[in-house]
Amino acid sequence: MSTRKAYYTKKIKRAVHLLFYRRHRKPGVKGWELRKALGSDYPKVLKILDKYLKALDLQVKTVFEEKKPAGKPTLEQLNKARFCITLRGELTPKEAKMMGWRIDDLAGLAVTIAHVISKKGKVPRKEIEEMLSDKLPGWKVGINIDRYIRHGYLTQDENEQIYLDWRTRTEVDQKALIDLILSSET
Amino acid sequence: MQPKRARAKLGREKLQRIIDMCKSVEERSLDPFLLDIDEVISVIKEYFPEWELPEDLCLDAETIHHLASVIKLQSEWVKHRSTSLYTDPFLLEEKLTRISKEEIIEIFLRTWHPIVEMEQISLHSLAQAIKYWKGLLPLNERWKEIAIEKIEMGLATREELIEQRILRDKAFSEELENFWQELIRTVEEKGEDGRIRYWNFVGAETYEETVHRAFMTSFLITYGYATLQIYPLEEEKFIKPYEKPVNKIGEKQLVSIPIAITVEDWMRWKKGELE
């Protein structure tokens, strides 16, 4: 094995340990942490790891602190960003059930996220409760919203306004979700 | 006088209504363009000359503050409409109410890429944990009550204090002087060019004695009885005694040089590998 290859193999192993095992309350690792552990060429290590993960239907996801930069991100933007491993492809409803999500709860989450996006990212909790209670039993509505908040999909301020939180920004392709809902035949 | 007071009262009511309207736009996510900014500004301007009391001026400032928030919301609204994420909320709401559970699930699963994370324990950490558990004393042994022995009060003798290692049998300065003399003698006997290799001086039969000698040597250097010569490339260290103690404090910047005295290094020195 060439020295260069051995170098990157070692770095990739270390990156896998850092990215797969949960280290903080929120999953994922900050760019500056990766730089500290893997060295300044960590974006290259992640790129190689991403190629490896493609075969496993996984990917290295970069979540920028602010809006996703239009061009190539700067090193400073990468250092501030959060990196995590997400599924690359799609899940089947059966697989989603196996992950501990009831279909009703997942549908409620999808509708809530779409609703918040359509209202420019901010909706009163009451409005979401009313919308969900149309198809979910009343006692379950509050529990579900609290669960979405606990998991990091939504967040709520002191005025009971609901916003999208870090997990939605990481896991959900918001534009595709809205496009697919609008183009549905219903 | 009366019409002026009545007019001020009317003005306060109008400003309060504007504040309430702005608040409802901010809190209930209403369309910020529902508020006619020009009209609101003309009302604020109209009543501004009337305000004399600090409370009224505060109310005026509060109105401006809330109005600024609404203008900011208007700007965000325009920005959002120009992005690709904008959709007519009514159209989307309509779709969401009609869409079936199965269909929304199908759509969501096409756009959802959940985070993969592991929380399981590894075999290595499990082995470490078992090792720790085995070495852990039971609680009744760890939290034993300390039996306090009752003893008579009395005076301790100097010998007793030396025995308990509270006092040393020699004063520190005396011990340091003796150690310096030992360094001079050792350099004369075993040294070269008036100096000796660090380990050849501090190294002793036991590890404890070696640590003690290294400790004393550090004081010899700090107090100007000797100097340390370090050659980083060759990884060599020498101690050179001075003929007379030199006071270096205040003359130039002093530096601290940490030297690790590990058991491994001591054993290597014993085997003659560190000379």
Image (spheres, coloured by chain):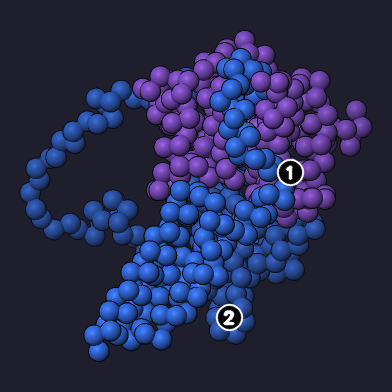
Chain colours: A purple, B blue
Residue under the image location 29 percent in, 75 percent down: B9
Query: In the figure, is residue B52 to the left or right of B84?
Result: left
x, y percent for residue A44 = 82, 41
Where in the figure is residue B139, as x and y percent of width and height? Answer: 28, 25
- Estimate the x, y position of residue B79 in percent, counting from the top left: 68, 54
Q: In the rendered view, would you say B14 is above or below A76?
A: below
Q: Quadrant of residue A145?
A: top left
Q: SS at mark 1?
A: loop
Other-residue count near label 1 (Cα within 10 Å), few / some / many at <14 / 14–19 / ≥20:
few
Residue B237 image position (x, y, % from top left)? 70, 60
In this rendered view, identify the residue nearer to me: B262 or B126: B126
Nearer to me, B117 or B164 = B117
Say which amino acid is labelled 2.
Lys
Q: Quadrant of the N terminus of chain B?
A: bottom left
The label shown at residue B84 is 1
- Quarter residue A47 falls in: top right
Secondary structure found at label 2: loop
Q: Chain of mark 1?
A: B
Residue that badge 2 annotates = B248
Q: How busy is the neighbourhood of tag 2: few (under 14 within 10 Å), some, or many (20 plus)?
A: few
Q: Nearer the viewer, residue B112 or A43?
A: B112
Q: Residue furthest right?
A: A2
Q: Is residue B151 above or below residue B241?
A: above
Left or right for A138, reference A12: left
Outermost residue toward the front in this view: B3
